[in-house]
Amino acid sequence: MSADGTETPAPIETDVLIIGGGPAGLFAVFELGLLDIKAHVVDILDKPGGQCAELYPEKPIYDIPGIPIVTGQGLTDALLAQIKPFGATFHWGQRVDALEKLADGCFRVVTDTGTEFRAKVVVVAAGGGSFTPKRPPLAGIEPYEGKSVFYSVRRMEDFRDRDVLVVGGGDSALDWALNLQPVARSLTLLHRRDEFRGAPHSVEGMRSLVAAGKIGLLIGQMSALVGDGSELSAVTVKTKDGERNVAANRLLPFFGLTMKLGPVAEWGLNLNENLITVDTEKFETSTPGIFAVGDINSYPGKLKLILSGFHEAALMAQAAYRIVYPGKKLLFQYTTSSSSLQRKLGVR
């Protein structure tokens, strides 16, 4: 019974609680499901896909094995279809605030909405933690955000036939300058210097479009916004030749992300530069029964690639099985030849 007299909901009991619904967390559902391990997934975002779908839903990804090209949202949709047979339960829009190990070896996990879980295993797949785009230091920018100023591209159609100003010199700025150029009425790329941090082929592609007159390139910085308080009409840009207004009713500033671990930092796990240290046998943390997969973890030779997270999830599931089913022999099987796995997947 709670303090206001209402009945407190019973904790949700599950084999595994996965914290994070990005690609690594979603694929963990698949690997666990093959081993008859049930999972619940919690994520602070309001939908699946993590940073991949939140910031880059239409950005092409080229290094998923066997898939020459897929967007962030396309990969998320494919993963959701793949894990559908295992009936995971999702809890979107919730932040895990508390995690403690109980005397019986299970974990008590509580979110900011008061949802409480009891899990035999916890898998942290929280990417880089919570992320917030860095806001340009421009007076009066807040009223334009979400209307004319965007920190990610969720739908390319929102930029069709618009005057677009992309600001930044990294991969995100270059990629979206290249991807939006065909749909925008005009597109200008602004960077503080004529050197770019993005992939060489992206820089070459951008410079080719500039030479062809299809992209405008300015070297300088934004100094003011011009508009009616909700809809931009131009951005004042300061260059070595003075100030000028650049037509822009869509502004995409890519100044990077502020990454914060949030409550994860208070869970007593070994951390290395705000990442969770794990072993490379099963990707377990310093607390037995808590694993970390994907961009949130750290180990010698770590590569922050989606395919690395998939590999980590597979080995984590093997170790989780021994916790969920202590003393039970684990029979390794291949989905290509195992009739029992094929029945689980609904393909036999």
Image (cartoon, rainbow, N blue to C red):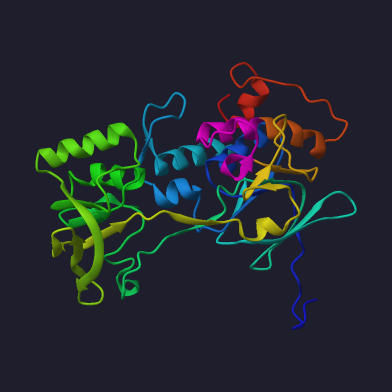
Residue positioned most to the front: 240
In the rendered image, residue 211, in percent from the top left (x then y), is placed at 11, 38
Furthest-top residue in this view: 337
Quarter-wise, where is residue 235 in the image? bottom left
Q: Is residue 274 above or below residue 291?
A: below
Residue 45, horizontal then vertical, whole percent: 52, 57
Judge from the rendering whether residue 319 lies leftward or rightward of residue 296; answer left or right: right
Can residue 295 be found in the magenta stretch? Answer: yes
Q: Position of residue 286 (x, y in %)?
A: 77, 44
Residue 80 versus residue 223: which sits nearer the camera? Answer: 223
Could you tell me if residue 35 is visible in this image?
no
Is residue 166 rendered to the left or right of residue 343?
Answer: left
Residue 213: within the magenta?
no
Question: Position of 34 compared to 213: left or right?
Answer: right
Looking at the image, residue 137 lies above or below residue 108? below
Q: Which residues are magenta?
A: 293-314
The quarter of the image holding the C terminus is top right
